[in-house]
Amino acid sequence: MSGGRPNRPVTTFAGAGTPGGRPAPDLVALLAVVFATYALQFFEATAAVPAVLRLTPAVWRLGWAWQLVTYPFAGFGAPTPWILLELLVLFWFGHEVRLRLGRRRFWAVLAAAGAGASAAAVLVQVAAEAALDGSPTAFPFQLMQGQRILLTIVIAAFATVWGDATILLFFVVPVKARWCLWLGILLAFVAYLGSKDLAGFAGICAATGIAALMLAPSSRRNRLRTLWLDWRRRRITRKLDRLARRRGMRVVRRDDDSNIN
């Protein structure tokens, strides 16, 4: 394999095929924790454990700030075999991404995208409740709890790192891996239509964007930084122009330096 971004065909259910090599112990531990906390919710004596770890309005109502970072580890969902399929897909994608990134960078992406997603979701939920005069909205954050946010992050990471690879979506439809970024957001939007969980949808979008941005090639990040700086420069210039017109002043810019003499 030559330098630069890898490019290889991948054929799977929805992701990274049959992973090669021995599974990383930390990835296996992550899957075990998610499944364990998922199972604990169905027993009266232990249901409080995942409940305390999940992202809830207690973050701002009771000051339970730890939920901003613990919620990805609390498995979520009804008691159906679907959880096993979710964990299997999480393993497929997570194994490939961890092999490519290494342990430290893999966990850095999970931590940053998970924390950024929860912060975005909480801000949206607080704004929504404020707009409704404190009235509770639909059950918030359900779209991004537990394995759902982890799946979002690793799929976004896979789509960024292996963007040119071809995957067989649901074993049938060949698509470029990079399209999984938009497919994930589209699926989250469809889920939002049924759940009305705007905060959860915002969290999914934030996690996808953060993971993709962290793993994007440096040239792409530089372009985004240039666009951001240009936007800030234009915004500041417009503010100065408005202030100058209001006070009858003339704003001297760098291109006017030759006239100051």
Image: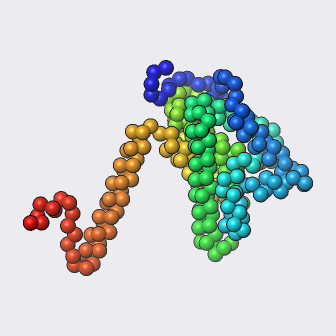
| Left or right for 8, reference 141 | left
Residue 94: x %, y % from top left: 64, 35
- Residue at 66 percent of width and 25 percent of height: 19
User: From the viewer's perspective, is residue 99 above or below residue 38?
Assistant: above
206, 1: nearer the viewer = 1
The quarter of the displayed image where residue 137 is located: bottom right
86, 54: nearer the viewer = 54
198, 16: nearer the viewer = 16
| Left or right for 155, reference 139 | left
| Left or right for 10, reference 219 | right
User: From the viewer's perspective, is residue 180 above or below residue 252?
Assistant: above
Q: Report the residue that reaches farthest toward the top.
A: 1
| Left or right for 172, reference 176 | right
Q: Which color scheme is applied?
A: rainbow
- Residue at 80 percent of width and 47 percent of height: 37
User: From the viewer's perspective, is residue 56 above or below residue 186?
Assistant: below
Residue 100: x %, y % from top left: 57, 30
The quarter of the displayed image where residue 187 is located: top right
Residue 3: x %, y % from top left: 45, 25
- Residue at 71 percent of width and 60 percent of height: 56
Can the viewer see residue 54? yes
The quarter in which the C terminus is drawn is: bottom left
- Residue at 65 percent of width and 47 percent of height: 149
Q: Report the residue that reaches farthest toward the bottom.
A: 247
How many numbered discs, if any? 0
Can the viewer see residue 190? no
Residue 180: x %, y % from top left: 56, 38
Q: Report the residue that reaches farthest toward the left.
A: 261
